[in-house]
Amino acid sequence: ASDVYKRQPQERYLPLLEAAVSSGEARPGDLAMLTDRVLMGKGEPQRYGSQLYENPETGKTEFYPIEDPANVNVRRAAVGLGPIEESAKHFGIEYEAPPSD
């Protein structure tokens, strides 16, 4: 079997969704959310801040760790997602992205 079949099921769909976004058949925000889910499944920080989890230490819902959080809103804007602070407010979470350098 090729490497593509050894990956997580969601990861197998990333290239298909990337192609659909390129051809205008899917939204970039959907690709961002799937990318974050795949990264989260691999235990890696997410890029767009679209995934939440319950922190086992605090019992509170919060954003799964975000890669380069100071630039998360730049990445979100590039795929048509609003600021992470708006998303946080929607889910009843207090969050402020760190200032970018």
Image (cartoon, grey):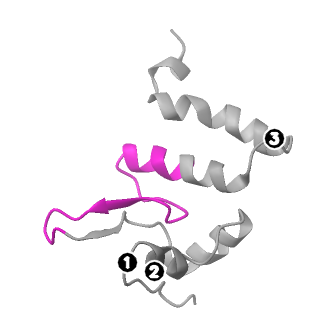
Which contiguous range is marked in magenta?
A: 35-59
Please indicate whether residue 56 sits to the left or right of residue 24 in the image.
left
> Nearest the camera: 77 or 6?
77
Label 3 to label 2: alpha-carbon separation: 30 Å
Does 11 appear above or below 32? above
Q: Amino acid at mark 2?
A: Lys
Which is in the foreground here, disc 1 or disc 3?
Answer: 1
Instruction: Determine the secondary structure under disc 3.
Output: loop
Q: Is residue 98 above or below residue 40?
A: below
Expressed as whole percent of the image width and height from the top left, the position of residue 56 reads 16, 62
Task: Tell me the chief SS of the magenta region.
Answer: loop
Tag 1 and tag 3, C-beta contact below 8 Å:
no
Tell me the quadrant of the picture where the C terminus can be found: bottom right
Residue at the image position 37 percent from the left and 63 percent from the top: 64
Whether residue 53 sits left or right of residue 71 in the image: it is left
Assess disc 2: are there few (<14), some (14-19) or many (≥20) residues with their C-alpha within 10 Å of its C-alpha.
Answer: few
**Compared with residue 78, is residue 96 higher up or lower down, i.e. above or below?**
below
Q: Position of residue 4 (x, y in %)?
A: 55, 22
Find residue 89 and name its label: 2
> For the residue labelled by badge 2, is the local secondary structure a helix, a strand or a loop?
helix
**Residue at (40%, 53%) from the top-left corner?**
44
Q: Residue furthest top?
A: 1
What residue is pinned by disc 1? 92
- Give coordinates of residue 33: x percent, y percent: 56, 53
What residue appears at the point 46 percent right and 48 percent down from the top-left corner?
Answer: 37
Q: Are marks 2 and 1 in contact (CB under 8 Å)?
A: yes
Q: Please, what is the three-letter code of the amino acid marked with disc 3?
A: Glu
